[in-house]
């Protein structure tokens, strides 16, 4: 492993990759810090920047953007009580209270330090577990793969916010949209309406940008609080000795919990920060301070969500299966680069795998370097009024989408999905499962076809193979568990903010 | 159970059923289904949209009893302007070039703001032109017509 890690560092430490990681983390923080824009929206907005790069550099930059966006989101949550996504809702609980008590500095510092420690630990886990899981994944047949994807889809739909049936329907609709285009097996055009641009399928980047980026702008326009300018002053940006003592154990517990949750399909930042906060509130010595500005209540969820952000790369890199919407974006980016993520990637693209792991560590270090001294700049960015901000974001989207293929068609696809994304938010349909379904749909079709061909049309193959049967059983358990009122209630409470 | 309609669920259910219905119709019209062993191009769409239609029915039926959950107000004006700005960019960028379509796009989008301040908008257009020029044309070197006369 050590040898491989050193190899990874030689890949990541080239000037091109280092600067990609740095620019990614910088831009990710800059966009992620904007109120109301979470990591998924940030990555979709910045995706086009990476298309001209070699695959390794592109994925390193995307990872940098992801970490930056997540940290930027924490900054807005702490300073302005405006979370961009579910995982930062938890941070607002105590972070914003700390800022109100005049402790914005320590809150921001502990978020950065906790994230850094968690990130370093989780990166080692990725390096250790990745190759091991790959070996397991290579023994998977088509039926096992199909069942694994089904499990991943169902678990991520079950765990997302709101109505489970609607989430699953959005996911299935996403799989359906993924079928548009040329059928790989027969070469037949499906649902293309004789539009030549659709023969390659609906563009992934325009879809993501419309549904997350554009829809987000429209939603923010109707929320007056997003326009509220920041008023908090930042005090000292470091921790006192006493604060260090208070946060050490929460950071360690948050890291452990986040690393484990991140690996699970459907897991990821939101679930892990919720879990870490709930755990801390139950066992901390300063229970009574929670909700009133407890530093532990910032340290634990911030460490957990960063640890999960790293380990959620494991299912992607080893099995090629995205565990959440961010990883679905990564799969999309890899496929655009001509790389099919999966168990063969470590062997076929060792520079990508090990380079990415080394960059995870470098990216975390950069985040601390970027964020602590430059926090003043981010705060100034938060003071830019929204009426100047949203046209700027919109034009970046427009230029980015157009330059994907130098074709206006992609811009129109973005418009359509911008409308749909806004509509979905009004009728309580979460867009993230649709994106995951869209990415997994074509892979599922291929594995279903292969499995059925091998079994001569006998669907029992999914139950006869032990791996597949186990995975399907888990999927059934997940659905049944969510149908039980008591569990559903506690999930809703947790998602509503602890 | 008493009838308590939930507008959000009913709308979502109808939307899924309609989408699945149209796609299933198109699928049976033009794609061979094949057999489970040798699937035609219509097999997976048939499964997917069949399941979607069933889920749509489930959402619709349960939505009759779980309400009331009204659909929030639609910000038609904001949405229309943002989407129009983007569409105009797509329509004009090839013919009029990046400078003109950027100005049009920002100009239209800025109308979504309640009070339209011309100085602020022109300032923003000038700033974004400079920034996008440096970033996209000079640094990233994307292939895009810049002026109406450059082809």
Image: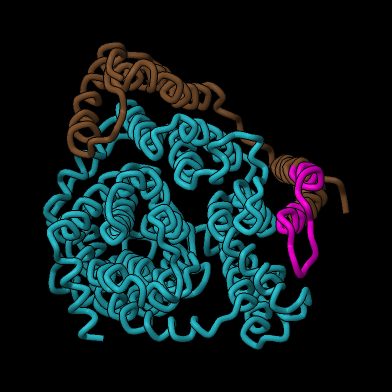
Residue A96 versus residue A415 in the image, above or below: below
Q: Nearer the viewer, residue B43 or A123?
A: B43
Residue A269 versus residue B23 in the image, above or below: below
Q: In which quarter of the view is residue A377 placed?
A: top left
Q: Is residue A237 left or right of residue A267?
A: left
Residue at the (21%, 54%) spot, across then down: A20
Q: Is residue B34 magenta?
A: yes
Q: Nearer the viewer, residue A302 or A50?
A: A50
Kindly indicate which chain is depicted in brown in the rendered structure.
B
Residue at the (25%, 32%) spot, across then down: A384
Residues shaded magenta: B23-49
Residue at the (68%, 80%) spot, across then down: A473
Q: Is residue A107 left or right of residue B90?
A: left
Residue positioned most to the right? B1
Q: Position of residue A231 (x, y in %)?
A: 24, 39
Residue at the (44%, 85%) spot, across then down: A135
Please say whether residue A163 is visible from this viewpoint.
Answer: no
**Which quarter of the figure is the N terminus of chain A placed in?**
bottom left
| Colour scheme of the rendered structure | by chain
Q: Position of residue A40 (x, y in %)?
A: 42, 51
Q: In the rendered picture, chain A carries what hue?
A: cyan
Please say whether residue A370 is visible from this viewpoint.
Answer: yes
Residue positioned most to the front? A187
Q: Position of residue A95 (x, y in %)?
A: 32, 57
Q: Is residue A242 magenta?
A: no
């Amino acid at each position: 492993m050590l040898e491989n890690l050193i190899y990874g560092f030689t890949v990541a430490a080239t000037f091109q990759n280092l600067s990609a990681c740095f620019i990614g983390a910088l831009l990710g923080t800059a966009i992620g810090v904007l109120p109301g824009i979470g990591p998924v929206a940030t990555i979709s907005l910045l995706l086009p920047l990476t298309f001209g790069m070699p695959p390794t550099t592109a994925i390193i930059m995307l990872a940098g953007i992801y970490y930056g966006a997540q940290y930027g989101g924490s900054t807005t949550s702490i300073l302005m009580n405006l979370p961009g996504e579910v995982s930062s809702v938890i941070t607002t609980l105590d972070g914003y209270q700390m800022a109100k008590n005049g402790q914005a500095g320590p809150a921001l510092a502990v978020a950065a330090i906790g994230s850094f420690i968690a990130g370093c630990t989780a990166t080692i886990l990725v390096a250790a577990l990745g190759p091991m899981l790959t070996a397991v994944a290579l023994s998977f047949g088509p039926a096992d793969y199909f069942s694994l994807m089904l499990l991943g889809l169902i678990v991520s739909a079950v765990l997302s916010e709101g109505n489970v049936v609607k989430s699953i329907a959005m996911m299935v609709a996403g799989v359906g949209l993924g079928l548009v285009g040329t059928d790989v097996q027969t070469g037949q055009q499906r649902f293309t309406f004789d539009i030549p641009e659709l023969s390659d399928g609906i563009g992934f980047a325009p879809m993501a940008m419309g549904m997350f980026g554009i829809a987000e702008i429209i939603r923010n326009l109707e929320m007056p609080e997003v326009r509220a300018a920041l008023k908090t002053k930042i005090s000292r940006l470091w921790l006192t000795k006493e604060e260090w003592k208070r946060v050490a154990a929460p950071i360690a517990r948050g890291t452990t919990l986040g690393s484990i949750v991140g690996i699970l399909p459907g897991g990821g930042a939101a679930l892990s920060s919720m879990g870490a906060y709930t755990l801390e509130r139950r066992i901390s010595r300063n229970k009574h301070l929670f909700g009133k500005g407890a530093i532990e209540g910032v340290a634990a969820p911030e460490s957990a969500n960063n640890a999960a952000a790293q380990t959620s790369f494991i299912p992607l890199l080893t099995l090629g299966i995205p565990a959440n919407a961010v990883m679905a974006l990564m799969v999309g980016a890899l496929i655009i680069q001509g790389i099919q993520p999966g168990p063969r990637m470590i062997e076929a693209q060792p520079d990508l795998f090990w380079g990415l792991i080394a960059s995870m560590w470098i990216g975390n270090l950069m985040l601390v370097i970027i964020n602590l001294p430059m926090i003043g700049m981010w705060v100034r960015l938060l003071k830019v009024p929204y009426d100047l901000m949203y046209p700027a974001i919109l034009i970046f989207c427009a230029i980015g989408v157009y330059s994907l293929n130098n074709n206006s068609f992609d811009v129109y696809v973005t418009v359509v999905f911008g409308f749909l994304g806004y509509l979905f938010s009004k009728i309580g349909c979460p867009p993230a499962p649709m994106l995951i379904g869209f990415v997994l749909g074509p892979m599922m079709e291929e594995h279903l076809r292969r499995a059925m061909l091998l079994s001569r049309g006998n669907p029992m193959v999914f139950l006869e193979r032990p791996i597949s049967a186990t995975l399907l059983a888990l999927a059934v358990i997940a659905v049944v568990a969510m149908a039980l009122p008591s569990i559903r209630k506690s999930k809703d409470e947790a998602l509503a903010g602890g | 159970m008493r009838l308590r309609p939930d507008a959000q669920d009913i709308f979502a259910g109808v939307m899924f059923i309609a989408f699945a219905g149209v796609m299933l119709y198109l699928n049976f019209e033009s794609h061979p289904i094949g057999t489970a062993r040798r699937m035609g191009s219509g097999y997976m769409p048939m499964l997917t949209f069949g399941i979607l239609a069933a889920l749509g029915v489930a959402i619709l039926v349960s939505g009759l009893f779980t309400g009331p959950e009204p659909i929030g107000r639609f910000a038609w004006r904001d949405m229309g302007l943002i989407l129009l700005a983007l569409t105009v960019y797509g329509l004009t960028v090839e013919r009029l070039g990046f400078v003109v379509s950027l100005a049009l796009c920002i100009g239209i989008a800025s109308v979504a703001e309640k009070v339209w301040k011309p100085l602020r908008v022109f300032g923003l257009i000038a700033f974004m032109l400079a920034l996008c020029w440096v970033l996209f044309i000079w640094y990233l070197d994307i292939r895009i017509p810049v002026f109406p006369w450059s082809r």
